[in-house]
Image (spheres, helix red, strand yellow):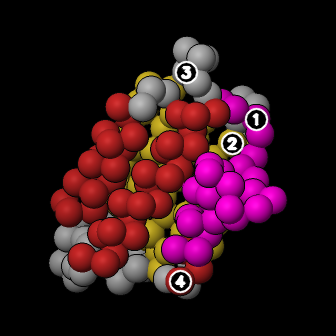
Amino acid sequence: MADRQEATVTLPSVPASVSTARRHVLDILAQWGLPRRTEDAETVRLIVSELATNTVQHTRGQSSTFTVDVRLDRDEELRIGVTDSHPRHPRLPAAVQQDHGRGMVIVRCLAAERGGRVTVVPTAEGGKTVWIRLPWIAPAH
């Protein structure tokens, strides 16, 4: 395996792009021989869905796009990043009982459950990338 495998897709910030982003990430991981367990695939599916949904909701009305990056490092770390042009960083809701806004709580819990972490990095263009980093065993080739 190369030191790093990478794939990127840029999508319009519209609701239909959420399922496209999810399929893209799962297809890429399948091409790389991952995930091997259904529960890992479900974790990735939910994380990508929540991040893409947040992006679409917060960039609604703007003629914009978002980018999904998937990286698998030889050091057995899977990184999934979603970049958009909205300057506001995701926030945890004040009350978990709210009807919306729980996406980042879910993402953080799923990442922590797998020994991973969530980071938010501002972009040079004024937006941000939300990175999920998960320990992952790379397939032997």
Q: In the picture, residue 46 is in which quadrant? A: bottom left
Q: Marks 1 and 2, how far apart in space?
A: 6 Å
Q: Marks 4 and 1, how far apart in space?
A: 28 Å
Residue holding disc 3: 64
Q: How many marks?
A: 4
Q: Residue at x 58, y 56 (%)?
A: 103
| Left or right of residue 92: residue 10 | left
- Decide: marks 1, 2 in contact (CB < 8 A)? yes
- Decide: marks 2, 4 in contact (CB < 8 A)? no
Which residue range is magenta in the image? 85-110
Query: Which numbered disc, 4 or 1, marks the residue that appears first in the sequence?
Result: 1
Q: Is residue 38 above or below residue 130?
A: below
**What amino acid does circle 3 point to?**
Ser
**What amino acid does circle 2 point to?**
Lys
Q: Which mark is residue 128?
A: 2
In the image, residue 103 lies in the stretch drawn in magenta:
yes
